[in-house]
Amino acid sequence: EDQVTQSPEALRLQEGESSSLNCSYTVSGLRGLFWYRQDPGKGPEFLFTLYSAGEEKEKERLKATLTKKESFLHITAPKPEDSATYLCAVQARQGGSEKLVFGKGTKLTVNP
Amino acid sequence: KAGVTQTPRYLIKTRGQQVTLSCSPISGHRSVSWYQQTPGQGLQFLFEYFSETQRNKGNFPGRFSGRQFSNSRSEMNVSTLELGDSALYLCASSFRSGGPDEQFFGPGTRLTVL
């Protein structure tokens, strides 16, 4: 069965302290891996799509990378406004249906 | 460009009742997907509609149903509500069906079942 596991569940950083979030996945035939950011009380906000191993994408302080078994979201010199839950999802085909399978997220807190 | 809108934002119902939630996608998007988000299970896919047809379905009981109108607006219905149906219900729109297209989410409807 297709699965997405994110680690750590929660991460506390000091402002400026760089780190990485991990998303490991098991899917038959990856068609796309997505990163979203979710703030409390809001819907997820799209960040990146990665399609194949070796691909990298950047946006401001965030950089997403992809290997055959996992993806990393690197956060460089984070600021308090980067505090949010980061969700990873893979496009999967299950039981004849296409769907996004989400991990449970990493809650990031950046202290000033 | 206006984002995905969902109404109502909050609902309180009692067990056994039914509820209908509404979602208006981004203009030009024809695919609408629905998700249930709970602290224990995270985000789980319910179903997807494209051009008024259900294209994809998750593993939820038949009490959960939906439909899509010709203007791409979608509704989700939950009948015979159970306590475990308390959750944030999110809809997301995309241009194409079945991915891998980025989906854009609405703010959600917070449903509480008492």
Image (cartoon, grey):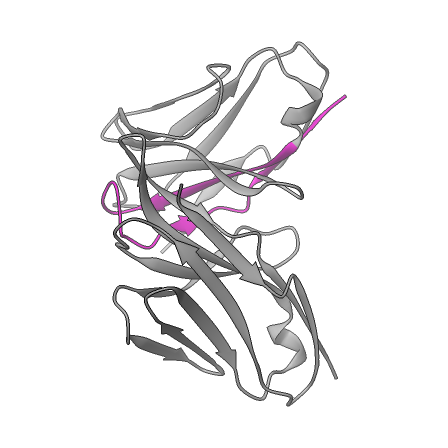
In terms of image quadrants, where is residue A78?
bottom right
The reply, left or right, for residue B77 in relation to residue B33 is right
In the rendered structure, the answer to whether residue B54 lies left or right of residue A2 reads left
Expressed as whole percent of the image width and height from the top left, the position of residue B34 reads: 44, 35
The residue sitting at 26% across, 31% down in the picture is: A96
Q: Nearer the viewer, residue A56 or A68?
A: A68
Residue B7 image position (x, y, % from top left) = 54, 34
Q: Residue at x 67, y 44 (%)?
A: B39
Note whether A73 is above or below B42 in the view shown. Answer: below
Quarter in which the N terminus of chain B is drawn: bottom left
Q: What residue lies at 39% left-to-right and 59% top-to-bottom?
A: A34
A78 shown above or below A48: below
Q: Which residue is at the front of the view, A41 or A85?
A: A85
Specify whether B4 is left or right of B48.
Answer: right
* Magenta stretch in the rendered image: B87-114
Q: Is residue B110 magenta?
A: yes
Q: In the figure, A60 relative to B95: above or below?
A: below
Tell me what residue is drawn at x 26 percent, y 47 percent: B99
Quarter of the image where the C terminus of chain B is located: top right
Left or right, A82 with reference to A60: right
Front one among B23 and A108:
A108
Placement of A51 over or under A94, stated as above or below? below
Q: Residue A86: which quarter of the image?
A: bottom right
Residue A97 pos. (x, y %): 29, 33
Horizontal and vertical percent position of residue B20: 53, 21
